[in-house]
Each structure stands twice: as C-alpha cells, then as structure tokens.
Amino acid sequence: MDVYLDNLTMEFEDITAVNRLSTTIKDGELVSLLGPSGCGKSTTLMLLAGLYKPTSGDIYFGEKNVTKLDAEKREIGMVFQNYALYPHLSVLKNIMFPLRMQKVPKKEAKERAIEMANLVQIGHLVDRKPGQLSGGQQQRVAIARALVKKPKLLLLDEPLSNLDARLRLEMREEIRRIQQEVGITAIFVTHDQEEALSISDRVMLMKGGLLQQDSAPQEMYRKPINSFTAAFLGNPPINFLQIKKTEKPRTFELMNSSQIVKIPVNHEKERIQLGLRPENLYVTNKEDAFITGEVIHLETIGRDTLIRVQIGEVTIRALIDPSIDINVGDQCHLGINQEYIHYFDVENGANLE
Ligand code: ATP
C-alpha cells in the first residue's frame, strides 16, 4: 500500500514538531525516518499510527484519506523499542493476542501465530514466556505479533536500540528479510545513521520538524543536499574546512592558515565550506597534495588507520591504509579525488553544486 503525506504538520503549543512534511512511500518500500533527538521522528510515526491527529495536512493510505481515522481502523502493525510484550503470556499467546481481540477462532489464530513464529524463526520458542528469551528473540516475538493481523503498514519505532551492537546488526538484517518476505510497506524510526543507510530503500532525514533530504541511502551519502546532511551521515564524520578566494582562479586560501588549496571548479563565492570525507583522503606526496598538516593522533580502527591531522587551527580526520608508515609528529600530505570534494555555502549550508 502506498502512503502519502501531504503537508503534514503537528504543533504542540509553541513547538512545531512536524512542519509541512510531504512525501510518498511506495508499496513495499522500507523508509527510514532519521534525525537527531527532537527532530520529529516519533511524532511523525504517531501521526501515521493515528495516535495523534495532525494540526493540519493529510495522510493517505492508497487513495483513502485516513487523517481522521482512528488508530484501530488503520490496519497498522507497530513494533516498539521496549517490545511491549505481555510477560504473563506465552510467546504463542502473545502473538495470537491481536487475533483473539478480533475474535478470530482459537484454532485459526493459533495456526496463524505459529506461521508467524516460523517466519521470524522462533517456532521452537513458542511455549516460553517473554522473560525466558533474549532481547533479540523478544523483538522477533514483537515483530510476529505486529504482523499476525496482516497489516498494510508496519511502523517500527527504534526497534533495535535496546540490543547490543552485534544483535543490532543481526536483527536489522532480519527485519529487512522479514519485511521483504512479507512485502509490507514499512517505516522505520532511528537516530542511527548507519542503521538507516543499511536497512532502507529510502531515508528521510529530519531536523527541527523539517525534512532535510529524502533520497536513497547512497545518494544521500554521495550527494548531501546541505552540510547538515553531510555531517549527519558518516562515521568518522565528514571534515569541514573553510576557504577564501585569492586573486588566482580556482585558488583559495585556507581560513586561519596561509595554506593554498586548489579546487577544480571556479566558484564565485568569496568563501566556501569544503566537505571532505575521511575515507576519501589518502596519504600522498607533496606534488599531489590537496592539503598538508601535522599528524597529531593515530589509532587503528578495524581494517583502517585513523589519523588526525592539524592544519592551521583545524584538525581533520583521515582513514588511511594501515601499511603506510606514518607517525605522530610527521608532516602529512593528503590527497583527494576531485569528484569527492563537497562544496557548501558558508551561510546557509546549501550544497553549491
Ligand atoms: P527522539 O529521538 O528523542 O525520540 P524525535 O525525533 O522522535 O526524538 P519527537 O518525539 O517527535 O522527536 O519530538 C519532536 C518535538 O516535539 C520535540 O521538541 C518534543 O519535545 C516535542 N514533543 C513531542 N511530543 C510532545 C508532546 N506530547 N507535547 C509537547 N511537545 C512534544
């Protein structure tokens, strides 16, 4: 089922939690709502669920305007961070619960619950109580319970935040598998950019109630619409360097340092904010250098070495090949492929390309 949001707005007294949000979520897509705390993700989800009614704007499920429709009539499945299982009921009864509420006969409810338990791979645990399960298993029960009524839309509110790092990885792959197997349209709220980028067909990045960018994960990463998006995605984060124009074309000076930087395009702006991702920088020789500084920190992270390089008053991070012989205190020339350089407006952060 397609979902359309048309200028959706939610005000709480003096706060606009969601501000004129418009988008289309296509049938079978998994879309992440991503953004820092307080950006309006959960409010958007509550509006979709029908637990809040918007101040203005409309929500359509397919052709149908559901803005005023009550939550229980929306045919939605929800999964929460804290699983919200009934502790005194067995796994099977937890999964059957929504069907029993709908007065589905016991035998049929049981069959459908078992089918769901198998789908989420907890078929062997149906007689246990939630307290006898791991966090990941409990989340599987919650997903089965959310899907058992065959809803048209699945809403997931930070479903992985209570799990440890390894389980989080496993469960995000599982959520994606289950969502694709069922073919359900899903909206996934998270503040974790890596999670959003890895799990989704599309990411909606919000800030202060406003949608910043709405695109496929790779596009958002490669073509951030502004410096907020660029900074929110990526770990270690993107480096920003301010440069100012000199007399010569394509030649700028680094702010707070007399170092000269040559860029491949002629920008009219007096000053520009450059964005350089740590993984796009590499150690090179003086001739090929884009910028030069002193290594002030070095550590091994996984398969890469992370260095911090002091350039005038700013430090930048680069992820480099661990076989390179470089030490703290060394002078370091860093190169970058021109296509990876991002240019942002110093005042409003807009991508200048
Ligand atoms: P988090 O990641 O911390 O859950 P979020 O992105 O989900 O944040 P929301 O919970 O949607 O953000 O909140 C958006 C804004 O609306 C915040 O400023 C919040 O304080 C405010 N807000 C949310 N719910 C209410 C409410 N019931 N009454 C008043 N203000 C609210």
Image (cartoon, rainbow, N blue to C red):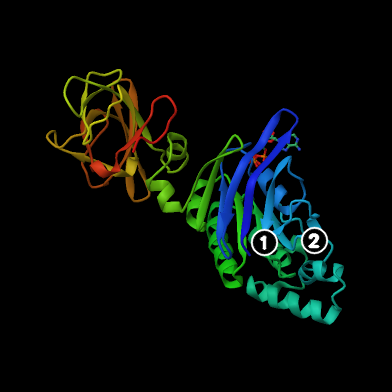
Q: Position of residue 17 (x, y in %)?
A: 67, 36
Residue 63 bears which disc, if any? 1
Q: Which residue is mark 2?
A: 73
**Residue 197, visible in the rendered structure:** yes
**Residue 160, visible in the rendered structure:** no
Q: Residue at x 42, y 33 (%)?
A: 350
Q: Position of residue 188 (x, y in %)?
A: 60, 54
Count of numbered circles in the view: 2
Q: Residue at x 61, y 61 (%)?
A: 2
Q: Quadrant of residue 11?
A: top right
Quadrant into which the N terminus falls: bottom right
Q: Above or below — where is 258 with respect to 285? A: above
Asked if the beta carbon under badge 2 is closer than 8 A to the nearest atom of ligand 1, the reply is: no
Q: Position of residue 210 (x, y in %)?
A: 58, 38
Quadrant into which the C terminus falls: top left
Q: Residue at x 72, y 27 (%)?
A: 14
Q: Secondary structure at mark 2?
A: helix
Asked if the beta carbon under badge 1 is closer than 8 A to the nearest atom of ligand 1, the reply is: no
Tag 2: amino acid: Lys
In the picture, measured across the screen, residue 41 lies left or right of residue 83, that is left
Quadrant of ligand 1: it is top right
Q: Secondary structure at mark 1?
A: loop
